[in-house]
Image (cartoon, grey):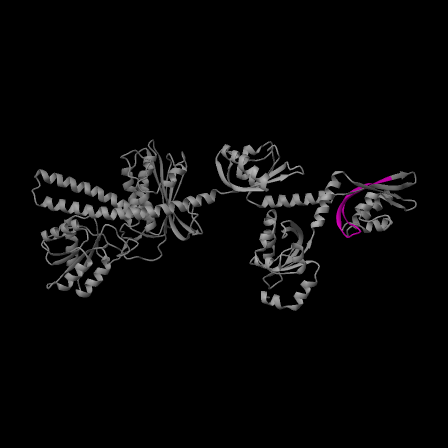
Amino acid sequence: MSPHELSTDSNIARFFDLSLDLLCIAGTDGYLKRVSPSFVSLLGHTEQELTSRPWIEFVHPDDIQATLRFGRRLSAGRDAKHVVTRLRHADGSYRTLEWNASIPEGETLIYAVARDITEAERQAELMEQTHRTAGVGGWDLDLQSGELRWTSETYRLHETSPDAYTPTVATAIDFYAPESVPIITSAVERATAFGEPYDLELELVTAKGRRIWVRAVGEVEMAPSGPVRLFGAFQDISERKARELMQRRFETMSKGTPDFIGIANPDMTVQYVNRSGLAMAGRESYEDTRVSDFHPAWALEKFRAEALPAAMRDGFWKGEIALQHADGHEIPVYMICMAFKDAQGELEFASCIMRDLSEQKALERQLLQSQKLEAVGQLAGGIAHDFNNLLTAIVGNAECAAHEITAHHPTHVRLEQIMRAAQRGASLTSQLLGFARAQLAQPRVIDLEATLADTRKLLTHVIDESIELVVEPGADLWLVRMDPAQLEQVVLNLALNARDAMPRGGTLRISTRNVVASGGLPGLELTPVHGEFVELRVEDSGAGMDMAVMDQAFEPFFTTKEVGKGSGLGLAMCHGIVRQNDGHIALDSRPGEGTTVRIWLPRCTGAAPRVEATVAEPASAGSGTILVVEDEAAVLRMVVMALEGHGYEVLGAATPDEALTIARSHEGKIDLLLTDVVLPDMDGRQLAEAVAVERPGIKMVYVSGYSQDHISDRGVLAEDVHFIQKPYRPSELAASIARVLAD
């Protein structure tokens, strides 16, 4: 039934108008669709006000959680009966309502009826005062005459009077609830027949139809002939029963929640902690404990100075604080503190609910770290690109200059030193590109076990003899697709870090296994992960890391090693390479407990084209015309000079427009286009396509200090693309061009 049908259904409308009870129909979207006039009258809000705002806004704050559970029960297809909640009146006060509700089969609307029990609740409060004064009714039955006499308190408990009712055994028993009648009947019969006393707790229905719990006590006066008198006491125990019921419900609720639930006395001694709370705090019991035992000093001060005063003033306080585990470590928690006051406004007891925020805080740190690494990666890639251009000019000019003088010339040695220094700079930029996921890769399908076997031979030469190397390959490992050189880089860097963490020796364990992820991986809770992976695990028994170091471990240039003993790029490079290959990497460590690095590489389910490695050969004198496009002037001059020195005719261009002009106007043949990837106005691939239109059949070679999507898929080179990574030597460039022209 749609809301429109509700508004036009005259039968429902008339039924709503005539009902003395509070009727409403609500949707699962959290809004009331229709309310009866009695509903409007009781709460003082207009029907428009009640139906235009989420109904949860009218619920008393203390009743919200119970009301939401009421809603979940309905959504699960179960009826909800005798649910009590408080709704806010237009004047700001609250009315207490008792609800019955259900969702009919096949419908999505909630049908509910409620009764105002505000007055009954007030009467219950008055009864609590009566109970505290131990108001007890008495009765007396003469077994000879059958006369039954009640005291005035007994009449009051039955909600009748001597003028309206004369008690008899039969009619007195009729006051009991149907389920209690057989029990009290049997007890009275045994008492009158055998003189057996009884002490029972039963439900009774008063003259006004109200159900109450009573304690019925009967004693027998015996004579030689047998029982002659039955007398006893009658006491309303409804309040105690209600408390017991609430206690059972509270215990059931507190057992079922993972949150910490605690109650403390005014002197801050602990009165109650649920099982989940004890487990969270690492304790077996709350006996003989105080609030101060559950919080570190700073959190205890915050509780005393902020939380408790706010709860006394406003009824509750909400905020983040810390719980102290029994072993001393702090657990971040979100606390709701509630203060309950007596009639004089003094604290009667305080309760709190605390939710463990450890996982949430870890996710926040992981997200922040991911964002930080992404930003730094972009910066690192840009720096590496610019630096490679500078190194290309330095290496090229140094090599050209070296060829112009004899090997015995004093300057020749200096030029060789310049080239070696530039080569070390190139190694540094390679690591930066690895971190930025911009390193050029030549992946192929590999067997991780076989590749690790080759890498193990290398590791034996770089780790100390005091370190035991244990390699544990998994059974029937799946294949992965990755550049073997990159895998060797990753394992070698992790092994070197492990070696440095174990200066006095230890164990370096490298293991592999197949893993099927169906939602997450250890240490990667932030992003759901699904699929089949081969896990590479590198564990050491070294010094380990604390959380502060782990948070920065993957950042470039971050290192805990002494100055000059580490660049801080090892783990950053590992992170970049793994992510470039669609893999995942996570770090787990604690001070004194070693470090474990887990890497998950996607399973390769199909064969990939092999990229054969090429070996640079000395370049002989070349012939042909080459169009060189390079926006860095120093690099352009060096390349033109170097290629001319190798016998080529070279046409230099600093911009794509200049290159296209040359391609159109040059009268002779142009054999090859050598272009940078990153150019102003047009990238290298676009330029190559435009030049190919003017010069069909021209061969292409790309160069760059930063491989991007212009010529590759996330840094993975296609088979038909010729690419030279900056920085390069002129001799290497000439050899590569010669191979391309010879194909």
Query: How many numbered marks are there?
Result: 0
Asked whether 46 or 267 is in front, the reply is 46
Indicate the quadrant where residue 563 lies: top left
Q: With respect to residue 120, does 21 lie above or below?
A: below
> Measuring 27% from the left and 48% from the top, which residue is drawn there?
382
Indicate the quadrant where residue 291 lies: top right
Horizontal and vertical percent for residue 261? 58, 41
Horizontal and vertical percent for residue 617? 15, 50
Magenta highlight on residue 211: yes
Magenta highlight on residue 714: no
Asked whether 639 or 465 is in front, the reply is 639
- Compared across the picture, whether 364 is left or right of 207 comes to left
- Which stretch did the figure color magenta? 195-220
Indicate the quadrant where residue 568 lies: top left
> Measuring 36% from the left and 52% from the top, which residue is drawn there?
602
Horizontal and vertical percent for residue 601? 36, 50
